[in-house]
Image: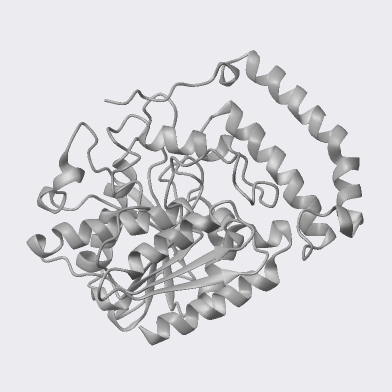
Amino acid sequence: MASVSKFPLVSYQPFRVFFQVLYASAIVLQLPYFAVRAAVPALRPHPEWSAKQTFMTCLVYRLLDLTSRVGIKETINLEPRKEGRRFQIVKPAEPEYYSGILASGDIKPETIGGTWFPDVPKGDAASTTIFLYFHGGAFIQGDGRNATCGLIVKKLLEKGGADAVFSVQYRLSGHGGQNPFPAALQDALSSYLYLLNNLHVPGNQIVLAGDSAGGNLAMALLLYLRNFGAATHVPAPKCAVLLSPWVAPFHYNMTDNPHRHTDFVPTTYPYWGANAYAGGWPNAQSDPYITQLGNPFRTVPIFANAGTAELFYERILKWAEEMSGIEGNVIEVNHEDAGVHDTFLSAEILGFEKSAWEVAAKVGEFVRKC
């Protein structure tokens, strides 16, 4: 059995506040350097990047590294908050739906929540195309609500072919054995069954979608449905949309990665997320529910977007090649030119709005073809 990830020393007070102040001060001192790199085209990490893209990518990299080194996951709750009635409670389905890997160990399905965009479906939801969305954040950040997914969902509603989106607030993992695998996958199945059994939405009207870790979770759910769906009469969805999917969480050593200087994701972030999520799971690096790279399977049509400047670009392409090698699979890969990891999430912050909206339009074309 692999060991459960532990909190780093700097996550405890008073070390935490001292570390955060020192690191933040170092970032402030680096701001002039970031500005010079942004202002001089020859110094930019990528020749096609703008000044804003360069400056903000450098800044977000440091901020994300600071958060990762402290290692305190976000706190979520089941209160409606600003989302009001659009926030819906999802209770676990009957025990017989959770088989195999979802019925093993001490982790049990729990009540979760989710946010509807643009509003709770009215009348016959079966006549609409509903995206079941799993947010990114390395399994340790995010909640699927307005603040984290509002801009993502706007793209899907306006250009991506979605009539409605249900964005899932699955349990987040954390150091010390907080909600480890398969908690998030149990929640993904609960939300899918909520659409099928509670709202009576046909499977062929549901699009599974997710960015980064959410793309990993969508793939894990597709694999689970392939292995256990028939036994419980759970149909497959219409198709899947994966945005910079995290197909190999434990491949976080970036020393030989050609894109390590053209992305905002520091090594500390995937290291934290992978180990908090599945560090205590045996053979996590090869388990197909955690690591999709190297574990292809037959499934529904998939659209996958990968930024040509992101850390995971080559691994996404290799995964797509493996999946395409399975007879009957339809895997459409979009190469987002000069794009960093998960521009759907970071476009407005980093300055990749134009390419993110172009990707959204291609998602819409794909969904309408399925």
Q: Report the colour scheme.
A: one colour
Q: To which quarter of the image does residue 152 belong?
A: bottom right
Front one among 317 and 119: 317
Residue 74 in sight from this viewpoint: no
As displayed, is residue 279 above or below residue 130? above
In the image, 105: left or right of 364? left
Front one among 311 and 56: 311
In the image, 288: left or right of 26? left
Residue 37 in sight from this viewpoint: yes
As displayed, is residue 163 above or below residue 177? below
As displayed, is residue 38 above or below residue 356? above
Q: Furthest residue to the bottom?
A: 369
Q: Furthest residue to the top?
A: 14
Q: Furthest residue to the front?
A: 256
Give the residue drawn at x 19%, y 33%.
105
Image coordinates for residue 219, horizontal then vertical, percent:
34, 58
Of the 4 image quadrants, the one containing the N terminus is: top left
Image coordinates for residue 79, horizontal then vertical, percent:
44, 46
Image coordinates for residue 95, horizontal then vertical, percent:
12, 48
Give the residue drawn at x 56%, y 62%.
150
Q: To which quarter of the image does residue 320 belong?
A: bottom left
As displayed, is residue 159 above or below residue 264? below
Image coordinates for residue 240, horizontal then vertical, percent:
37, 69
Of the 4 image quadrants, the one containing the C terminus is: bottom left
Number of numbered discs visible in the structure rendering: 0
Front one among 104 and 261: 261
Q: To which quarter of the image does residue 125 belong?
A: bottom left
